[in-house]
Image (cartoon, helix red, strand yellow):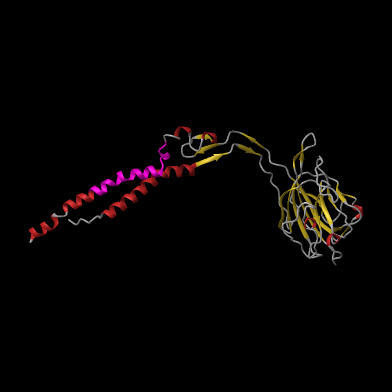
Amino acid sequence: MNVRRVSSANVRQSKVIGGIAIAFVLAAPATVWAVNREFLPGIQWQQPPVITPGESDGPPSDAIVLFDGTDMSAWENAENWTVADGVVTEGRGDVRTKQSFGDCQLHIEWSSPLPARGRGQGRGNSGIFFHDRYEIQVLDSYDNETYFEGQAGAIYKQMPPLVNAMRPPGEWNVYDVIWTSPKFNDDGSLASPAYVTALHNGVLILNHFELRGDTFWPTVPSYQAHGPGPIRLQDHGNPVRFRNIWVREFKPLTSERVHEPKFHDHDTGREWLVSEGETPPEESSESPAAESPTAAAQAAPAETDSIEQATRSTRSRRPWRPVRRWLGR
């Protein structure tokens, strides 16, 4: 009989490995539980509307086109601005949209004059106003120093752009602005401030910035109750050009609660409220899956005692091996 010697080190190693294996097996159901358990928030959402995106910065199917290169019929005082070759050039007096807007996404392209003239705030200056009172600055900020909260892409007098993404004079710049209007209580007090996110030539320049109020040059920012308002383009005495102007109004999706937040176990079909805990109430104290890996490891030596007993039994038979060989000679 060929019996392999089993050292005490091997026995101890077997105990450790056996303990780890048993602990893993006992812990496994908890892992499987987490995989097969689904969280159900209990909110029934409105189906998002389907739209057709535009091509090459063109308006999507749900956009309101404010200027398509042919006429300024969507604006007041437009007769004092010049439309030619698909662009409109800043003229005498501001222009305002005839339609009022609240929360919206605005796309607008603009170009500062070439050759560049003037410096600071006197070079390629205009502005885009929401509700006729909150301005994102238009300015030739290409190699043109001015106060930071007054350069291109700034919320005027409140927040500079995160970066200067300006193109050289004569080239076209693109603003994509996500505007969230301020909301007011019935008594005229502020319920929530205005927020703005903006990209300049595809680069983030304002990230959900909270406005402190209006942006007029001579006054401290403040909020006065108002509803939807026009979009205004400013005349600042510089022949800034504009093209491809469109806007999308947006509203939050509607929803309703159909049940309280709960879990669903796809293996057993059980469901229970999130407020009742991570596991079903009836199994929180009785489930074997609740046994910790430490307890399993402590139980492991009992499972490996048979290995040590078998080793001792083998050792007790070893002396017969040389006797049988001697008797056979």
Find residue 46 and report its horizontal and vertical position in percent.
Answer: 66, 39
Q: Quadrant of residue 144?
A: bottom right
Q: Is 170 situated left or right of 198 in this image?
A: right
Picture coordinates of residue 149, whole percent (x, y): 78, 55
Q: Residue at x 52, y 33 (%)?
A: 276
Residue 172 image offset from top left, x and y in percent: 79, 62
Q: Is residue 281 visible?
A: yes
Q: For the magenta stretch, what is the residue range?
A: 287-309
Most foreground residue, 168 or 105: 168
- Quadrant for the C terminus in the image: bottom left
What residue occupies the far bottom of the structure in this picture? 115
The relative height of residue 293 versus residue 206 in the rendered view (above or below) is: above
x and y percent of residue 146 in the render? 81, 60
Would residue 27 be found to the left or right of residue 192 on screen? left
The residue at 62%/37% (across/down) is 44
| Along the line of sight, the residue nearer the viewer: 253 or 20 | 20
